Amino acid sequence: MSDGAMAERMSRASAARRREPRRGVALTVLIVNQLLAGIGVASGMALAAILVADLTGVVAMGGLAQSSSVLGAAIVAIPLAKLAVRSGRHVSLAVGYGLAVVGALLVIAAATTGAAPLVFLGLAAFGAGSAAGLQARFAATEVAAPGFEARSMSLVLWATTIGSVAGPLLSESGDRVGVALGLPYLVGPFIFSACAFAISTILVATLLRMPPAGVLATDPAVAPIEGAATTERAATDDATVDAAAGAAPDEALQGDGPGGRRPDEGVDIVDATGAAPAASVGSLMAMRIAVREPRALFAILAIVCSHTVMVGVMVMTPVHMVAHGLSLNLVGLVISLHILGMYGASPLMGWLVDRIGSVRVILMGSAILVVAAVIGILAPGDDLLLVPLALGLLGLGWSAGMIGGSTLVTTSVEARIRVPLQGATDAAMNLAAALSAALSGLVLGAFGFAGVNVVALLVLVPLAVVGLRIMAQRRAQAA
Protein backbone atom coordinates (compact mmCIF):
# COMPACT_ATOMS: atom_id res chain seq x y z
CA MET A 1 0.00 0.00 0.00
CA SER A 2 1.39 3.44 -0.90
CA ASP A 3 2.14 6.07 1.72
CA GLY A 4 -0.67 8.26 0.36
CA ALA A 5 -3.24 5.47 0.55
CA MET A 6 -2.10 4.58 4.07
CA ALA A 7 -2.38 8.20 5.18
CA GLU A 8 -5.84 8.49 3.66
CA ARG A 9 -6.97 5.31 5.39
CA MET A 10 -5.65 6.51 8.77
CA SER A 11 -7.37 9.86 8.26
CA ARG A 12 -10.72 8.22 7.53
CA ALA A 13 -10.41 5.90 10.53
CA SER A 14 -9.55 8.86 12.77
CA ALA A 15 -12.58 10.79 11.49
CA ALA A 16 -14.81 7.79 12.19
CA ARG A 17 -13.51 7.61 15.76
CA ARG A 18 -14.17 11.33 16.26
CA ARG A 19 -17.78 10.92 15.09
CA GLU A 20 -18.45 7.98 17.42
CA PRO A 21 -20.81 9.15 20.19
CA ARG A 22 -19.88 8.82 23.84
CA ARG A 23 -22.33 6.20 25.03
CA GLY A 24 -22.17 7.11 28.72
CA VAL A 25 -22.93 10.77 28.00
CA ALA A 26 -25.80 9.83 25.69
CA LEU A 27 -27.35 7.52 28.30
CA THR A 28 -27.08 10.25 30.95
CA VAL A 29 -28.82 12.73 28.66
CA LEU A 30 -31.59 10.20 28.01
CA ILE A 31 -32.09 9.59 31.74
CA VAL A 32 -32.21 13.28 32.64
CA ASN A 33 -34.48 13.97 29.71
CA GLN A 34 -36.84 11.17 30.70
CA LEU A 35 -37.12 12.67 34.19
CA LEU A 36 -38.12 16.02 32.69
CA ALA A 37 -40.55 14.37 30.28
CA GLY A 38 -42.13 12.46 33.16
CA ILE A 39 -42.73 15.75 34.97
CA GLY A 40 -44.15 17.24 31.79
CA VAL A 41 -46.64 14.44 31.23
CA ALA A 42 -47.70 13.93 34.84
CA SER A 43 -48.09 17.58 35.88
CA GLY A 44 -50.51 18.28 33.03
CA MET A 45 -52.38 14.99 32.77
CA ALA A 46 -52.96 14.82 36.54
CA LEU A 47 -55.80 17.35 36.20
CA ALA A 48 -56.62 16.99 32.50
CA ALA A 49 -59.81 14.98 33.04
CA ILE A 50 -61.14 17.54 35.53
CA LEU A 51 -60.21 20.40 33.21
CA VAL A 52 -62.03 18.80 30.26
CA ALA A 53 -65.11 18.06 32.35
CA ASP A 54 -65.13 21.65 33.63
CA LEU A 55 -64.59 23.13 30.16
CA THR A 56 -67.26 21.04 28.42
CA GLY A 57 -69.72 20.94 31.31
CA VAL A 58 -70.11 17.17 30.84
CA VAL A 59 -68.50 14.96 33.48
CA ALA A 60 -68.41 11.95 31.15
CA MET A 61 -66.24 13.91 28.70
CA GLY A 62 -63.44 13.93 31.25
CA GLY A 63 -62.60 10.36 30.35
CA LEU A 64 -61.77 11.44 26.81
CA ALA A 65 -58.79 13.43 28.07
CA GLN A 66 -56.65 10.33 28.56
CA SER A 67 -57.98 8.75 25.36
CA SER A 68 -57.04 11.84 23.33
CA SER A 69 -53.50 11.80 24.68
CA VAL A 70 -53.06 8.06 24.08
CA LEU A 71 -54.43 8.33 20.54
CA GLY A 72 -52.05 11.21 19.85
CA ALA A 73 -49.14 9.04 21.01
CA ALA A 74 -50.31 6.24 18.71
CA ILE A 75 -50.61 8.55 15.70
CA VAL A 76 -47.09 9.98 15.95
CA ALA A 77 -45.26 6.74 16.93
CA ILE A 78 -44.62 5.59 13.36
CA PRO A 79 -43.69 9.04 11.94
CA LEU A 80 -41.23 9.54 14.80
CA ALA A 81 -39.64 6.16 14.05
CA LYS A 82 -39.26 7.11 10.37
CA LEU A 83 -37.72 10.42 11.38
CA ALA A 84 -35.28 8.60 13.68
CA VAL A 85 -34.04 6.48 10.78
CA ARG A 86 -33.78 9.42 8.40
CA SER A 87 -32.38 12.12 10.68
CA GLY A 88 -31.33 10.51 13.95
CA ARG A 89 -32.81 9.87 17.38
CA HIS A 90 -31.99 13.37 18.62
CA VAL A 91 -34.16 14.90 15.88
CA SER A 92 -37.12 12.57 16.38
CA LEU A 93 -37.09 12.99 20.17
CA ALA A 94 -36.81 16.77 19.84
CA VAL A 95 -39.78 16.82 17.43
CA GLY A 96 -41.86 14.65 19.79
CA TYR A 97 -41.17 16.85 22.80
CA GLY A 98 -41.65 19.98 20.70
CA LEU A 99 -45.11 18.76 19.69
CA ALA A 100 -45.89 18.27 23.38
CA VAL A 101 -44.98 21.94 23.99
CA VAL A 102 -47.42 22.93 21.23
CA GLY A 103 -50.05 20.65 22.77
CA ALA A 104 -49.67 22.24 26.20
CA LEU A 105 -50.00 25.73 24.69
CA LEU A 106 -53.13 24.63 22.79
CA VAL A 107 -54.69 23.36 26.02
CA ILE A 108 -53.95 26.69 27.69
CA ALA A 109 -55.47 28.56 24.74
CA ALA A 110 -58.55 26.32 24.73
CA ALA A 111 -59.18 26.85 28.43
CA THR A 112 -58.64 30.60 28.12
CA THR A 113 -60.98 31.04 25.14
CA GLY A 114 -63.50 28.34 26.03
CA ALA A 115 -62.93 26.52 22.72
CA ALA A 116 -63.65 22.97 23.91
CA PRO A 117 -62.70 21.13 20.67
CA LEU A 118 -59.28 22.75 20.79
CA VAL A 119 -58.50 21.11 24.12
CA PHE A 120 -58.76 17.63 22.57
CA LEU A 121 -56.44 18.64 19.72
CA GLY A 122 -54.02 19.99 22.31
CA LEU A 123 -54.13 16.80 24.37
CA ALA A 124 -53.52 14.72 21.23
CA ALA A 125 -50.41 16.79 20.45
CA PHE A 126 -49.50 16.54 24.14
CA GLY A 127 -49.45 12.75 23.69
CA ALA A 128 -46.44 13.11 21.38
CA GLY A 129 -44.39 13.67 24.53
CA SER A 130 -45.39 10.21 25.76
CA ALA A 131 -44.54 8.71 22.37
CA ALA A 132 -41.10 10.32 22.47
CA GLY A 133 -40.57 9.06 26.01
CA LEU A 134 -41.36 5.53 24.86
CA GLN A 135 -38.97 5.88 21.93
CA ALA A 136 -36.26 6.90 24.39
CA ARG A 137 -36.28 3.38 25.87
CA PHE A 138 -35.23 1.99 22.49
CA ALA A 139 -32.61 4.71 22.13
CA ALA A 140 -31.11 3.52 25.43
CA THR A 141 -30.36 0.09 23.93
CA GLU A 142 -28.41 1.74 21.12
CA VAL A 143 -25.91 3.30 23.54
CA ALA A 144 -25.63 0.20 25.75
CA ALA A 145 -22.58 -2.02 26.01
CA PRO A 146 -23.10 -5.60 24.76
CA GLY A 147 -25.15 -7.57 27.27
CA PHE A 148 -26.45 -4.43 29.02
CA GLU A 149 -29.26 -3.46 26.64
CA ALA A 150 -32.10 -4.20 29.04
CA ARG A 151 -30.38 -2.54 31.99
CA SER A 152 -29.82 0.65 30.00
CA MET A 153 -33.47 0.63 28.96
CA SER A 154 -34.59 0.05 32.54
CA LEU A 155 -32.60 3.04 33.82
CA VAL A 156 -34.34 5.32 31.33
CA LEU A 157 -37.74 3.95 32.36
CA TRP A 158 -36.81 4.21 36.04
CA ALA A 159 -36.21 7.95 35.65
CA THR A 160 -39.91 8.19 34.77
CA THR A 161 -40.66 7.24 38.39
CA ILE A 162 -39.27 10.51 39.68
CA GLY A 163 -41.07 12.55 37.05
CA SER A 164 -44.37 10.70 37.53
CA VAL A 165 -44.28 11.29 41.28
CA ALA A 166 -43.04 14.88 41.12
CA GLY A 167 -45.46 15.93 38.37
CA PRO A 168 -48.74 15.61 40.31
CA LEU A 169 -47.10 17.19 43.37
CA LEU A 170 -46.46 20.28 41.23
CA SER A 171 -50.07 20.51 40.07
CA GLU A 172 -51.24 22.71 42.94
CA SER A 173 -48.22 25.02 42.64
CA GLY A 174 -48.78 25.21 38.89
CA ASP A 175 -52.41 26.13 39.42
CA ARG A 176 -51.42 28.96 41.77
CA VAL A 177 -48.94 30.24 39.19
CA GLY A 178 -51.63 30.12 36.50
CA VAL A 179 -54.15 32.01 38.63
CA ALA A 180 -51.50 34.63 39.42
CA LEU A 181 -51.00 35.06 35.67
CA GLY A 182 -54.71 35.51 35.12
CA LEU A 183 -55.35 32.06 33.65
CA PRO A 184 -58.46 30.00 34.44
CA TYR A 185 -58.58 27.40 37.19
CA LEU A 186 -56.64 24.12 36.52
CA VAL A 187 -54.71 25.56 33.56
CA GLY A 188 -51.52 26.48 35.42
CA PRO A 189 -50.04 22.94 35.53
CA PHE A 190 -49.82 22.96 31.74
CA ILE A 191 -47.41 25.90 32.04
CA PHE A 192 -45.07 23.61 33.98
CA SER A 193 -45.62 20.91 31.36
CA ALA A 194 -44.75 23.28 28.52
CA CYS A 195 -41.59 24.42 30.32
CA ALA A 196 -40.49 20.83 31.08
CA PHE A 197 -40.99 19.71 27.50
CA ALA A 198 -39.29 22.84 26.15
CA ILE A 199 -36.20 22.05 28.22
CA SER A 200 -36.37 18.43 27.00
CA THR A 201 -36.51 19.61 23.39
CA ILE A 202 -33.46 21.82 23.78
CA LEU A 203 -31.57 19.15 25.74
CA VAL A 204 -31.89 16.35 23.19
CA ALA A 205 -31.45 18.67 20.19
CA THR A 206 -28.18 20.11 21.45
CA LEU A 207 -26.54 17.49 23.67
CA LEU A 208 -27.79 14.06 22.56
CA ARG A 209 -25.49 12.32 20.11
CA MET A 210 -26.42 8.75 19.22
CA PRO A 211 -25.31 5.95 16.93
CA PRO A 212 -27.51 5.59 13.86
CA ALA A 213 -31.04 4.59 14.87
CA GLY A 214 -31.43 0.83 15.04
CA VAL A 215 -27.71 0.06 15.39
CA LEU A 216 -26.68 -1.88 18.50
CA ALA A 217 -23.22 -2.52 19.88
CA THR A 218 -23.88 -6.23 19.31
CA ASP A 219 -24.33 -5.73 15.55
CA PRO A 220 -21.26 -6.84 13.58
CA ALA A 221 -19.17 -3.81 12.58
CA VAL A 222 -17.17 -4.41 9.45
CA ALA A 223 -14.88 -1.65 8.23
CA PRO A 224 -15.46 -1.15 4.50
CA ILE A 225 -12.36 0.93 3.81
CA GLU A 226 -10.90 -1.77 1.60
CA GLY A 227 -14.34 -2.17 0.03
CA ALA A 228 -15.18 -5.78 0.95
CA ALA A 229 -17.11 -7.24 3.88
CA THR A 230 -17.18 -11.01 3.74
CA THR A 231 -19.75 -13.33 5.22
CA GLU A 232 -16.98 -15.17 7.08
CA ARG A 233 -15.84 -11.95 8.78
CA ALA A 234 -19.44 -11.10 9.77
CA ALA A 235 -19.97 -14.55 11.26
CA THR A 236 -16.72 -14.30 13.22
CA ASP A 237 -17.65 -10.88 14.63
CA ASP A 238 -21.09 -12.15 15.57
CA ALA A 239 -19.72 -15.18 17.38
CA THR A 240 -17.25 -12.96 19.22
CA VAL A 241 -20.09 -10.73 20.44
CA ASP A 242 -22.04 -13.71 21.75
CA ALA A 243 -18.98 -15.15 23.46
CA ALA A 244 -18.09 -11.81 25.06
CA ALA A 245 -21.64 -11.40 26.33
CA GLY A 246 -21.45 -14.81 27.99
CA ALA A 247 -24.40 -16.33 26.17
CA ALA A 248 -24.87 -20.05 26.62
CA PRO A 249 -25.10 -21.99 23.35
CA ASP A 250 -28.81 -22.63 23.64
CA GLU A 251 -29.46 -19.01 24.63
CA ALA A 252 -27.50 -17.72 21.66
CA LEU A 253 -29.44 -20.05 19.39
CA GLN A 254 -32.75 -18.76 20.70
CA GLY A 255 -31.72 -15.11 20.74
CA ASP A 256 -32.69 -14.92 24.41
CA GLY A 257 -29.44 -14.53 26.23
CA PRO A 258 -27.33 -11.42 26.73
CA GLY A 259 -27.08 -9.78 23.35
CA GLY A 260 -30.31 -11.51 22.38
CA ARG A 261 -29.46 -12.71 18.86
CA ARG A 262 -28.89 -16.01 17.14
CA PRO A 263 -25.47 -16.42 15.53
CA ASP A 264 -27.17 -17.33 12.26
CA GLU A 265 -29.58 -14.39 12.34
CA GLY A 266 -29.51 -12.04 9.34
CA VAL A 267 -28.28 -8.75 10.75
CA ASP A 268 -27.32 -5.91 8.47
CA ILE A 269 -23.66 -5.02 8.39
CA VAL A 270 -22.82 -1.59 9.78
CA ASP A 271 -19.66 -0.01 8.54
CA ALA A 272 -17.03 1.71 10.65
CA THR A 273 -18.05 5.14 9.44
CA GLY A 274 -21.30 4.76 11.34
CA ALA A 275 -23.58 4.59 8.32
CA ALA A 276 -27.04 3.46 9.28
CA PRO A 277 -28.53 0.35 7.74
CA ALA A 278 -30.78 1.04 4.80
CA ALA A 279 -34.39 1.71 5.73
CA SER A 280 -35.79 -0.50 3.00
CA VAL A 281 -39.13 -1.28 4.66
CA GLY A 282 -41.91 0.70 6.29
CA SER A 283 -43.47 0.07 9.67
CA LEU A 284 -46.37 -2.03 8.39
CA MET A 285 -44.07 -4.20 6.29
CA ALA A 286 -41.74 -4.55 9.28
CA MET A 287 -44.67 -5.75 11.37
CA ARG A 288 -45.68 -8.29 8.71
CA ILE A 289 -42.13 -9.62 8.56
CA ALA A 290 -41.80 -9.82 12.35
CA VAL A 291 -45.04 -11.66 13.09
CA ARG A 292 -43.82 -14.60 10.99
CA GLU A 293 -41.03 -15.21 13.51
CA PRO A 294 -42.24 -16.64 16.86
CA ARG A 295 -39.76 -14.73 19.05
CA ALA A 296 -40.51 -11.38 17.43
CA LEU A 297 -44.26 -12.07 17.59
CA PHE A 298 -43.90 -13.00 21.25
CA ALA A 299 -42.08 -9.70 21.91
CA ILE A 300 -44.78 -7.66 20.17
CA LEU A 301 -47.55 -9.43 22.07
CA ALA A 302 -45.70 -8.95 25.36
CA ILE A 303 -45.67 -5.17 24.89
CA VAL A 304 -49.21 -4.83 23.52
CA CYS A 305 -50.93 -7.29 25.87
CA SER A 306 -49.13 -6.11 29.02
CA HIS A 307 -49.95 -2.47 28.30
CA THR A 308 -53.56 -3.22 27.37
CA VAL A 309 -54.14 -5.19 30.58
CA MET A 310 -52.47 -2.54 32.71
CA VAL A 311 -54.44 0.38 31.26
CA GLY A 312 -57.79 -1.43 31.27
CA VAL A 313 -57.58 -2.42 34.94
CA MET A 314 -55.77 0.68 36.22
CA VAL A 315 -58.19 3.29 34.85
CA MET A 316 -61.19 1.56 36.45
CA THR A 317 -59.63 0.90 39.85
CA PRO A 318 -60.22 4.43 41.23
CA VAL A 319 -63.86 4.30 40.08
CA HIS A 320 -64.25 0.89 41.72
CA MET A 321 -62.69 2.05 45.00
CA VAL A 322 -64.70 5.28 45.24
CA ALA A 323 -67.90 3.32 44.57
CA HIS A 324 -67.10 1.24 47.66
CA GLY A 325 -66.68 4.33 49.84
CA LEU A 326 -62.90 4.68 49.93
CA SER A 327 -61.41 8.16 50.13
CA LEU A 328 -59.49 9.93 47.37
CA ASN A 329 -56.39 9.84 49.58
CA LEU A 330 -56.52 6.04 49.63
CA VAL A 331 -57.10 6.00 45.88
CA GLY A 332 -54.02 8.16 45.42
CA LEU A 333 -51.98 5.84 47.63
CA VAL A 334 -53.01 2.79 45.60
CA ILE A 335 -52.16 4.50 42.31
CA SER A 336 -48.78 5.52 43.77
CA LEU A 337 -48.07 1.87 44.63
CA HIS A 338 -49.06 0.95 41.10
CA ILE A 339 -46.65 3.50 39.58
CA LEU A 340 -43.92 2.28 41.93
CA GLY A 341 -44.45 -1.24 40.61
CA MET A 342 -44.35 0.00 37.02
CA TYR A 343 -41.19 2.08 37.13
CA GLY A 344 -39.53 1.59 40.49
CA ALA A 345 -38.71 -2.05 39.74
CA SER A 346 -37.37 -1.28 36.26
CA PRO A 347 -33.66 -1.74 37.16
CA LEU A 348 -34.45 -5.15 38.64
CA MET A 349 -36.32 -6.21 35.51
CA GLY A 350 -33.53 -4.94 33.27
CA TRP A 351 -30.97 -6.91 35.26
CA LEU A 352 -33.11 -10.05 35.05
CA VAL A 353 -33.53 -9.71 31.27
CA ASP A 354 -29.77 -9.41 30.78
CA ARG A 355 -29.15 -12.34 33.15
CA ILE A 356 -31.85 -14.91 32.35
CA GLY A 357 -33.23 -13.69 29.03
CA SER A 358 -36.23 -11.80 27.71
CA VAL A 359 -38.50 -14.81 27.20
CA ARG A 360 -38.25 -15.95 30.81
CA VAL A 361 -38.89 -12.44 32.14
CA ILE A 362 -41.90 -12.01 29.86
CA LEU A 363 -43.35 -15.32 31.07
CA MET A 364 -42.71 -14.24 34.67
CA GLY A 365 -44.47 -10.93 34.01
CA SER A 366 -47.43 -12.72 32.45
CA ALA A 367 -47.75 -14.90 35.55
CA ILE A 368 -47.67 -11.79 37.76
CA LEU A 369 -50.41 -10.18 35.67
CA VAL A 370 -52.53 -13.32 36.01
CA VAL A 371 -52.13 -13.25 39.81
CA ALA A 372 -53.04 -9.54 39.87
CA ALA A 373 -56.19 -10.19 37.80
CA VAL A 374 -57.25 -13.12 39.99
CA ILE A 375 -56.86 -10.99 43.11
CA GLY A 376 -58.89 -8.25 41.40
CA ILE A 377 -61.66 -10.76 40.69
CA LEU A 378 -61.81 -12.10 44.25
CA ALA A 379 -60.99 -9.04 46.39
CA PRO A 380 -63.78 -6.84 47.82
CA GLY A 381 -63.60 -3.26 46.59
CA ASP A 382 -62.95 -1.88 50.08
CA ASP A 383 -60.18 -4.32 51.00
CA LEU A 384 -57.21 -2.20 52.01
CA LEU A 385 -54.74 -5.05 51.60
CA LEU A 386 -55.74 -6.98 48.49
CA VAL A 387 -56.67 -4.03 46.25
CA PRO A 388 -53.30 -2.26 46.70
CA LEU A 389 -51.56 -5.63 46.30
CA ALA A 390 -53.37 -6.26 43.01
CA LEU A 391 -52.45 -2.81 41.63
CA GLY A 392 -48.84 -3.14 42.76
CA LEU A 393 -48.56 -6.53 41.05
CA LEU A 394 -50.26 -5.10 37.97
CA GLY A 395 -47.50 -2.49 37.69
CA LEU A 396 -44.79 -5.09 38.33
CA GLY A 397 -46.14 -7.40 35.63
CA TRP A 398 -46.31 -4.48 33.20
CA SER A 399 -42.67 -3.65 33.93
CA ALA A 400 -41.55 -7.21 33.18
CA GLY A 401 -43.59 -7.38 29.98
CA MET A 402 -42.54 -3.94 28.76
CA ILE A 403 -38.80 -4.27 29.41
CA GLY A 404 -38.61 -7.92 28.36
CA GLY A 405 -40.73 -7.33 25.26
CA SER A 406 -38.96 -4.12 24.24
CA THR A 407 -35.56 -5.76 24.57
CA LEU A 408 -36.67 -8.78 22.56
CA VAL A 409 -38.24 -6.58 19.86
CA THR A 410 -34.91 -4.80 19.53
CA THR A 411 -32.61 -7.83 19.56
CA SER A 412 -34.65 -10.51 17.77
CA VAL A 413 -34.95 -8.90 14.34
CA GLU A 414 -32.50 -7.78 11.69
CA ALA A 415 -31.31 -4.20 11.78
CA ARG A 416 -33.15 -3.04 8.65
CA ILE A 417 -36.59 -3.54 10.25
CA ARG A 418 -35.65 -2.75 13.86
CA VAL A 419 -36.70 0.91 14.11
CA PRO A 420 -39.79 0.61 11.84
CA LEU A 421 -40.93 -2.34 13.97
CA GLN A 422 -40.40 -0.35 17.16
CA GLY A 423 -42.62 2.43 15.83
CA ALA A 424 -45.32 0.01 14.68
CA THR A 425 -45.28 -1.81 18.02
CA ASP A 426 -45.67 1.41 20.00
CA ALA A 427 -48.50 2.51 17.72
CA ALA A 428 -50.29 -0.82 18.21
CA MET A 429 -49.70 -0.65 21.95
CA ASN A 430 -51.21 2.82 22.28
CA LEU A 431 -54.17 2.03 20.03
CA ALA A 432 -54.93 -1.07 22.08
CA ALA A 433 -54.60 0.94 25.29
CA ALA A 434 -56.98 3.62 24.03
CA LEU A 435 -59.53 0.95 23.10
CA SER A 436 -59.03 -0.74 26.47
CA ALA A 437 -59.58 2.50 28.36
CA ALA A 438 -62.75 3.25 26.37
CA LEU A 439 -64.28 -0.23 26.78
CA SER A 440 -63.30 -0.89 30.39
CA GLY A 441 -65.92 1.57 31.62
CA LEU A 442 -68.63 -0.31 29.74
CA VAL A 443 -67.39 -3.63 31.13
CA LEU A 444 -67.32 -2.20 34.65
CA GLY A 445 -70.90 -0.98 34.33
CA ALA A 446 -72.15 -4.31 32.96
CA PHE A 447 -70.11 -6.89 34.87
CA GLY A 448 -68.38 -5.05 37.69
CA PHE A 449 -64.68 -4.91 38.54
CA ALA A 450 -64.46 -8.71 38.38
CA GLY A 451 -65.55 -8.51 34.74
CA VAL A 452 -62.77 -6.01 33.98
CA ASN A 453 -60.21 -8.46 35.36
CA VAL A 454 -61.73 -11.43 33.50
CA VAL A 455 -61.31 -9.49 30.24
CA ALA A 456 -57.70 -8.80 31.27
CA LEU A 457 -57.11 -12.54 31.57
CA LEU A 458 -58.55 -13.09 28.09
CA VAL A 459 -56.19 -10.46 26.65
CA LEU A 460 -53.24 -12.50 27.95
CA VAL A 461 -54.31 -15.69 26.13
CA PRO A 462 -52.53 -14.95 22.78
CA LEU A 463 -49.33 -14.13 24.68
CA ALA A 464 -49.54 -17.44 26.56
CA VAL A 465 -50.16 -19.43 23.36
CA VAL A 466 -47.12 -18.01 21.56
CA GLY A 467 -45.00 -18.37 24.70
CA LEU A 468 -45.86 -22.06 24.97
CA ARG A 469 -44.98 -22.48 21.29
CA ILE A 470 -41.54 -20.99 21.88
CA MET A 471 -40.94 -23.19 24.92
CA ALA A 472 -41.94 -26.27 22.90
CA GLN A 473 -39.42 -25.28 20.19
CA ARG A 474 -36.74 -24.92 22.85
CA ARG A 475 -37.42 -28.37 24.25
CA ALA A 476 -37.31 -29.84 20.74
CA GLN A 477 -33.97 -28.17 20.01
CA ALA A 478 -32.57 -29.25 23.37
CA ALA A 479 -33.60 -32.84 22.60
Image (tube, rainbow, N blue to C red):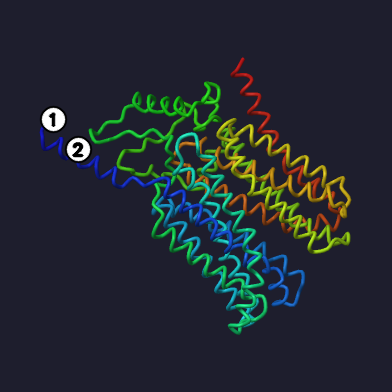
- In the image, residue 466 lies at what x, y percent? 66, 33
Q: Secondary structure at mark 2?
A: helix
What is the residue that sits farthest to the left in this orientation?
3
- Please say if 98 is above or below 436: below
Q: Is residue 469 left or right of residue 445?
A: left
The quadrant the C terminus occupies is: top right
- In the image, residue 428 lies at what x, y percent? 60, 50
Nearer the observer, 465 or 340: 340
Residue 250, disc = none
| Picture mark count | 2
Nearer the observer, 179 or 418: 179
Which residue bears the numbered disc 1?
A: 1
Which residue bears the numbered disc 2?
A: 9
- Please say if 210 is above or below 416: below
Nearer the observer, 465 or 128: 128
- Please say if 228 is above or below 341: above
As measured in the structure, the alpha-carbon distance from the residue carrying label 2 to the one carrying label 1 is: 10 Å
Q: Amino acid at mark 2?
A: Arg
Q: Residues within 10 Å of mark 1 (few under 14, many from 20)?
A: few
Residue at image location 72% in from the left, 65% down from the top:
63
Earlier along the polypeptide chain: callout 2 or callout 1? Answer: 1
Q: Amino acid at mark 1?
A: Met
The quadrant the N terminus occupies is: top left
